[in-house]
């Protein structure tokens, strides 16, 4: 993709625009000039040494009257050196994965001095983003032309520009050629082959590729469950022993698939290099505030916020608030069940058509209330977590995820738990489970992908018309692309997608033996989910910045916790089934004791299994060991030379003293 | 400590003997000469560059007729360079911990060119041991003068010498002056102060210091339990609510102390430098065998053994064998209970004096059988684990520990579980617990320390008399020391000591609410245990080689597992107590369900607590982060220079092309 606009004002012969910076309309020329200088300046002068130009040249600006969009690119060497600074890991010609260095660039597979494919476009964009974020204030007290935006030495300029509203957004550009290819092999033609995970990774980066990889893996892993579950539905099997078989299979299955995923994930991320990538030192997140002081780790000046204050906020405000919300959610659920009872009572007393409609009212009300509460809680959780003032983005994310997860878990499953263990109505449990699972899947698919896609399409037609109406004397394709993408929604990360899978996993595993068909519905949903999520990524949202990651992180823990809870619920359900109760007609206590003993045994087995299955496949372990050994050997070689020299010197000294 | 024998045959003015090598009596002169050459040879010629001399010079040899003992030492520079090769971590003058390098030696606290205290004697001995073990075969096909001892390039010479019986043993020497000081501050005067852990570490190394640190910590942690337990015994409290309070306290206590220990341990090992020490690449353990091949990690020739064969041996032989032993142990326990019943029956029928003696016979028999089984099983476990042919010593140790732990756990606690949950006789449970705890403590103290000490003392008097009878013309102190220490037993590691603590922890926590006095007995035992173990280390055994370690390793996991099991047993005991049963007179099922619910809640709380308490104290985390940051910064600096140079070069090239 070559730029078709003519604004090439340096000696560079080719400029590939990678990232777009949108400034606010009212930014002064002084600020723009300063920003340009800092981005273009040499590294040793505190710049980012990137290429920077306006989207439109002077002539075009006059025509279109829009001059707040800028393109950032970088020369090839600059990108390679950026890759080295980031610690990007690439495959070398001898098949091992190594951290890329510019000095040894020729020893990496696929590197030639004259090809541009060595770094994927996603990697280039990530490098540019990283360099922009690492552009730091030197002796400036504030952003020129913007006195309210204070700076201190070492403060990331881009972050201050964003928080002070000078820069509205920074986003990477789509590559329509590559996107087309990706789409063709991904979702446009319906077929049953696997997703092109490596290509997704090349285009969107590791975090998103891992999500799609997990989605696919999880769907495939559900198929055996779905197949085994079908006959239960078809032949209305309700024997005790068949339930036990299904539940036992389910329990072992849920442990094994999570362990196997860990191994598969290590395999993938080793191939991608992120398993070996060293984490950079994390900067404070943009929203973090505090009194200026010296960071004890870096020795740099930055805002500091005492840890005990944060702990107080977490334990004295956030924790009680979350508990209160959970209580409230339970309380509303109880009201719902009361309403349902009341409606049933009214219908039984005077069974008219109106009262039969009344039967549906509580469910509809409850669904609406839950949805409203979910949204309100999400805002509250985001506000509270921001107010806790975490220094790191990762800590912020973890605290937010924990808060949202707990609440969503309760909201989705509390009524099921109530039906299962208080009402003990297995028939109703199966019905509720089916209703919840299917409706949530349909609503999600529509609200998440199809609706935004439709809106996006409408908007895109409008923009195209507008651009064509301009009839200016430039190649409008690129201009149109930037204007279109600027207006697209921002993909807020994989959180909601994982949450959906997590809740689905709950529906499938928590009460599996009551509704064995759940897995089949989940499989069907996920086959379409792959496509609608792919559509969403490619067509609805701005291209997200690639983000290296070596695993699905906290979600692994969340899924494992869910599978532990599912052991408890499944054992309890089997213990409560009338068939099992019939085996112990005289003593219920013995039954309970046996069920508890079995449950403990299964839990112990789960932990032993998780402990005994290595997290990384053997060949990855070997490769990692080899890498470590090599670095130790290199160190030893260095020391051996040192030893020889030092001993020589020591002997010479000794000789002198003796003489 | 200067050597008082006269065998100083190099230009070195001082030779501190660190390590003794004992050769077999029938070793040929050729082998001795070759060994001497290899140890003394320069590093670059494949030697160890250490100092090496016989214990006796020629004149003395003729008098004493004993020439198979050799002393190994090292020059000061050699030791410093060895410390660097090992990656020893020391405190630098700015208070941070850094890997020692000879080049930057002056930046470390306590380093002067003319003092010898910088490295502790234990460290020096560890360095010498490491250098000896790393002395490797070059092109030799066998050990000269010993054709049956085959060699291949890269094989550790010392290990082959040991396995072929040429070298009988290698052991470090005690330093009587330092030992005296250590003993004075440790155990000779009885007082209630803390142990001098740092001094123990300086003399015996980190692994042993960590054991004593854990013993002390554990004892202090038991004191609150003991204090709370006392009034239950004194006032015969048997109320339900008091038991519940005691058990709840016990459960939270056991979780918290283990978490706090992890933090304390990180604190200590950071100070000692082992927390930061990089693990060296592990060599195959001496007993490992296989077909010669290329190790895929190191690329060196060494014996290889396919992993699947090992897995088969573990899962098809070892696992069934262990299960069989566990079954046998349970079977014998059942026979014991039958015997006891029978004896009671006989006594009840015809109550003579003889039959009242008969009452004790089953217990005595059972105790003897258990002891015999324990020993037999230990041999079998060692044999099996060796036969599994693990490549690494650490894997061997882990598999052995697991085997022995499971069996010991069952042997010690099976009868208690039987009494508690099958016989449901709480009175008998309390009695059995007390008997088992107290007798095992007394027997251990005697068998482990006092008896060997007495034997050792007798032997030492004999040797002294013998040496004095010689009346040779040499300073006999050092000769006597070596001869004495040569005959001392070898300390086989901390395994048995930890096992004792582990079982004690089981007695205290598993059934704590039945016998609240257990903690008090454990505390009393441990106060004397500290002293008897100290005596054992200082007086009974050869000095062990120091072994760096950063935690108590697999024992942390073992103790945590025990504390999980104790939650289950304590909840069950409380649920079974008549007072609790009285609260639910009509429905036992409700009672069981409530107990199970509480148990699950406590277990969940335990896991959340373990997750929420960070494993390292904040200041250690900060220091580690700082170290990581600094190494990243150093890397960046390096890359920045590179960047500048590369860009310059690139520009020059570009300029040329343009021209």
Image (cartoon, coloured by chain):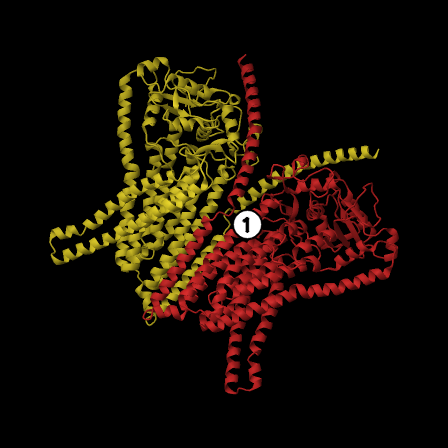
Chain colours: A red, B yellow
Q: Is residue B106 shown left or right of residue B310?
A: right
Q: Nearer the viewer, residue A534 or B192?
A: A534
- Residue lying at 63% horizontally and 65% vertically, measured from the top left: A445
Q: Nearer the viewer, residue A417 or A216?
A: A216
Tell me if I can see residue A68 in this picture: no
Other residues around mark 1 within 10 Å, as few (<14) / some (14–19) / many (≥20): some
Residue beneath disc 1 = A264
Q: Is residue A406 shown left or right of residue B565?
A: right
Picture coordinates of residue A562 (x, y %)? 50, 59
Picture coordinates of residue B189 (x, y %)? 34, 36
Q: Is residue B345 shown left or right of residue A227?
A: left
Mark 1 — on which chain does it sit?
A
Quadrant in the picture for residue B542: top left
Picture coordinates of residue B193 (x, y %)? 39, 41
**Image height check: is B192 above or below A313?**
above
**Image height check: is A177 above or below A299?**
below
Q: Quarter holding the C terminus of chain A?
A: top right
């Amino acid at each position: 993709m070559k730029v078709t606009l003519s604004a090439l004002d340096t000696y560079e012969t080719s400029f590939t625009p990678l990232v777009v910076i949108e400034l606010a309309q009212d930014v002064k020329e002084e600020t723009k000039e300063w920003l340009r200088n800092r981005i273009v300046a040499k590294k040793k002068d505190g710049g980012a040494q990137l290429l920077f130009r306006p989207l439109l040249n002077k002539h075009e600006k006059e025509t279109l009257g829009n001059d707040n969009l800028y393109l950032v690119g970088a020369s090839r060497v600059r990108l390679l050196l950026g890759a080295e600074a980031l610690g990007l890991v690439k495959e070398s010609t001898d098949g091992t994965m190594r951290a890329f260095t510019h000095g040894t660039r020729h020893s990496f597979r696929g590197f030639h001095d004259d090809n541009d494919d060595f770094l994927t476009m996603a990697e280039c964009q990530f490098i540019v983003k990283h360099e922009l974020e690492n552009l730091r204030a030197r002796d400036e007290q504030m952003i020129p032309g913007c006195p309210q935006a204070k700076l201190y030495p070492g403060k990331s300029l881009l972050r201050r520009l964003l928080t002070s509203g000078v820069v509205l957004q920074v986003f990477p550009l789509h590559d329509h050629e590559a996107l087309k290819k990706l789409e063709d092999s991904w979702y446009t033609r319906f077929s049953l082959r696997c997703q092109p995970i490596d290509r997704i990774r090349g285009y969107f980066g590791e975090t998103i590729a891992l999500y799609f990889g997990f989605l696919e893996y999880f769907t495939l892993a559900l198929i055996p469950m779905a197949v085994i579950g079908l006959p239960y539905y078809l032949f209305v099997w309700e024997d005790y022993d068949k339930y036990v078989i299904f539940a036992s299979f389910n329990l072992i299955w849920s442990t094994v698939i999570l362990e196997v995923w860990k191994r598969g994930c290590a395999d993938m991320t080793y191939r991608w290099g992120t398993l070996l990538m060293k984490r950079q030192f994390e900067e404070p997140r943009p929203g973090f505030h505090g009194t200026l002081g010296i960071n004890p780790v870096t020795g740099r000046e930055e805002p500091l916020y005492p840890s005990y204050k944060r702990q107080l906020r977490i334990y004295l405000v956030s924790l009680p608030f979350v508990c209160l919300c959970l209580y409230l959610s339970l309380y509303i659920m109880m009201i719902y069940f009361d309403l349902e009872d009341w409606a049933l009572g009214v219908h039984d007393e005077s069974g008219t058509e109106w009262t039969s409609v009344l039967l549906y009212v509580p469910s509809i009300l409850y669904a609406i209330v839950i949805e409203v509460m979910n949204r309100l809680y999400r805002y509250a959780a985001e506000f509270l977590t921001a107010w806790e003032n975490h220094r790191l983005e990762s800590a912020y994310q973890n605290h937010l995820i924990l808060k949202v997860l707990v609440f969503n878990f309760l909201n989705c499953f509390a009524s099921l738990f109530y039906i299962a263990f208080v009402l003990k109505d297995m028939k109703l449990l199966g019905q509720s489970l089916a209703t919840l699972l299917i409706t949530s899947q349909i609503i999600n698919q529509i609200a998440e992908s199809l609706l935004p896609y439709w809106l996006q399409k409408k908007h895109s037609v409008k923009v195209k018309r507008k651009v064509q109406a301009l009839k200016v004397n430039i190649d409008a394709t690129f201009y149109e692309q930037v204007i279109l993408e600027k207006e697209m929604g921002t993909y807020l990360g994989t959180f909601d997608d994982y949450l959906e899978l997590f809740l689905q996993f709950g529906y499938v595993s928590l009460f599996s033996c009551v509704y064995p068909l759940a897995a089949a519905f989940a499989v069907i949903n996920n086959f379409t989910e792959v496509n609608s999520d792919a559509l969403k990524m490619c067509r609805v949202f701005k291209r997200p910045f690639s983000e290296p990651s070596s695993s699905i992180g906290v979600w692994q823990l969340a899924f494992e916790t869910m599978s532990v809870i599912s052991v408890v619920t499944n054992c309890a359900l089997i213990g409560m089934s009338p068939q099992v109760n019939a085996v112990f007609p005289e003593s219920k206590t013995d039954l309970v004791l046996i069920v508890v003993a079995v449950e403990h045994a299964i839990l112990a087995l789960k932990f032993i299994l998780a402990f005994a299955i290595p997290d990384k496949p053997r060949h990855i372990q070997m490769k990692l060991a080899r890498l470590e050994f090599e670095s130790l050997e290199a160190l030893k070689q260095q020391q051996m030379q040192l030893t020889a020299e030092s001993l020589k010197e020591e002997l010479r000294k000794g000789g002198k003293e003796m003489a």
